[in-house]
Image: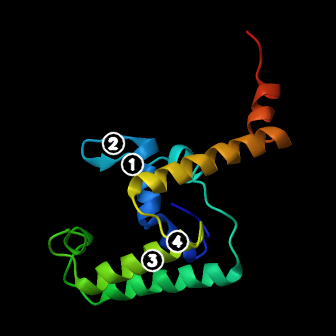
């Protein structure tokens, strides 16, 4: 649960690139993603984006929700069954994925492996910046008590 989240966050967490990150870093419980706020959400490398990009992602969120609303008789499981997914919803997600990925770079990714490689490089950069600033990890070191 994300309290007081901006609308564009749904666009981000329902994107292909975020799902790939979740699968890579969180593991699974049976066949489901074992989503963790600390391992997946808080560590997801996402660049600072402009108000215009946020608005674009917000519109993607609304498009996805509108497509879902066109099928009130279907459950989310029905809507997201790969063999039965409505074409409009599939297209809304495709457009969302493109919009989210444009937040990272202008040229499209060519594979899931390239997406993950890009994310892990950003994550390494993020960690390095935190260490250089003396945030998060440095603060943990200073506050640990010796046994």
Quadrant holding the C terminus: top right
Alpha carbon distance from label 2 to label 3: 25 Å
SS under mark 3: helix
Rendered image: mark on residue 23? 1
Rendered image: mark on residue 28? 2
Kindly identify the residue that appears in the image at 25 percent across and 70 percent down.
80
Alpha carbon distance from label 4 to label 1: 18 Å
* Mark 3 closeness class: few <14, some 14–19, many ≥20 residues within 10 Å: many
Alpha carbon distance from label 4 to label 2: 24 Å
Which of these two is toward me, 58 or 97?
Answer: 97
| Marked residue nearer the N-terminal end (4 or 1) | 1
Q: Are marks 2 and 3 in contact (CB under 8 Å)?
A: no
Alpha carbon distance from label 3 to label 1: 19 Å
Kindly identify the residue that appears in the image at 70 percent across and 81 percent down.
51
Rendered image: mark on residue 100? 4
Alpha carbon distance from label 3 to label 4: 6 Å
* Mark 2 closeness class: few <14, some 14–19, many ≥20 residues within 10 Å: few
| Marked residue nearer the N-terminal end (1 or 2) | 1
**Residue 68 visible in the snapshot:** no
Kindly identify the residue that appears in the image at 75 percent across and 31 percent down.
140
54 horizontally vs 39: left or right: right
4 horizontally vs 39: left or right: right
Residue 127 occupies which quadrant of the picture? top right
Which of these two is toward me, 72 or 16?
Answer: 16
Which residue is denoted by mark 3 in the rendering? 96
| Marked residue nearer the N-terminal end (3 or 1) | 1
SS under mark 4: helix
Q: Are marks 3 and 4 in contact (CB under 8 Å)?
A: yes
SS under mark 2: strand
């Amino acid at each position: 649960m994300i309290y007081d989240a901006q609308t564009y966050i749904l666009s981000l967490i329902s994107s292909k690139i975020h799902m790939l990150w979740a699968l890579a870093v969180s593991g699974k419980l049976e066949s489901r993603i074992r989503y963790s706020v600390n391992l997946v959400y808080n560590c997801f490398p996402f660049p600072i984006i402009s108000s215009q990009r946020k608005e674009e992602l917000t519109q993607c969120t609304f498009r996805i929700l509108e497509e879902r609303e066109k099928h009130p008789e279907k459950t989310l499981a029905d809507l997201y069954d790969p063999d039965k997914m409505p074409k409009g919803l599939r297209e809304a997600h495709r457009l969302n994925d493109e919009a989210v990925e444009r937040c990272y770079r202008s040229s499209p990714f060519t594979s899931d492996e390239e997406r993950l490689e890009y994310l892990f490089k950003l994550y390494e950069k993020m960690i390095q910046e935190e260490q250089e600033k003396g945030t998060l990890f440095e603060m943990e070191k200073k506050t640990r008590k010796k046994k």
